[in-house]
Image (cartoon, rainbow, N blue to C red):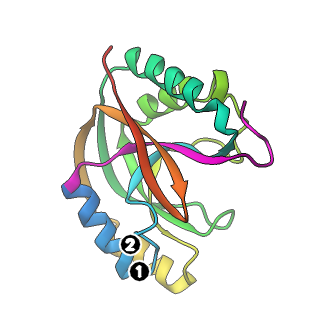
Amino acid sequence: MIAPHGGGRTLGVTIELPVDIRIQLDEVRQRYGTHADDWASHVTILAPIEADDAVLVGVIDHLSRVAARTRPIPMVLRGTGTFRPVSPVVFIAIADGISGCEQLEAAVRSGDLGVEARFPYHPHVTLVHGVSEELMDLAFREMAGYEAAFVAESMALHENVDGSWRIIREFRFSA
């Protein structure tokens, strides 16, 4: 079962970006002082949660079933947005693919992963987080014209091990 206040594992679910887009955005994130080495640029589907060790097999089965019912999601990343003043985040906005991400998030956040979200789900790619207001403003302006397109064909289950995120398994969309 998912542990509300701790567990043996920290898990998260993402849509991984194509390598060229990920490298480009990771370089930008490093330039603005965001810890791009901790977790490569991605679209979060399920924010990090604490889980008991025993739940991992059930989570993998659940994500396999969700992926089998999910079609690839055409995505367009365009421009910037921010969660300020609620959260010190500037992000790359998703212009196309929002509803596909929302449907995927709802399907993932059920069963063994049926945990309550801390914030309403808003798919995005974090650009900077927790840096100075000046750097957030600069990133917001400098990346406002950014655009990239791809088709999300899978999601990935990650685990945080010693402060770094690693993929446990990828789940291809096959509906």
Q: Are marks 2 and 1 in contact (CB under 8 Å)?
A: yes
Res 89 quadrant in image: bottom right
The question of residue 7 being in magenta is answered with yes
Q: Position of residue 130 (x, y in %)?
A: 58, 74
Q: Which residues are magenta?
A: 1-19
Q: Which residue is pictured at 38% across the width and 60% down the height?
A: 40
Amino acid marked by disc 1: Tyr
Q: Is residue 72 above or below residue 32?
A: above
Who is closer to the viewer here, 90 or 110?
110
Q: Is residue 106 visible?
A: no
Q: Which residue is pictured at 52% across the width and 49% down the height?
A: 159
Res 59 quadrant in image: top right
Amino acid marked by disc 2: Arg
Q: Is residue 16 visible?
A: yes
Q: Which residue is mark 1?
A: 32
Q: Position of residue 158 (x, y in %)?
A: 48, 46
Res 15 quadrant in image: top left
Q: Position of residue 74 (x, y in %)?
A: 28, 33
Crowding around mark 1 (Cα neighbors within 10 Å: few <14, some 14 to 19, many 20+) is some
**Inter-mark Cα distance, 2 to 1:** 5 Å
Q: Which residue is pictured at 80% across the width and 48% down the height?
A: 5
Q: Quadrant of the N terminus?
A: top right
Crowding around mark 2 (Cα neighbors within 10 Å: few <14, some 14 to 19, many 20+) is many
Q: Is residue 145 left or right of residue 94?
A: left
Q: Is residue 110 above or below residue 143?
A: above
Q: Which residue is mark 2?
A: 29
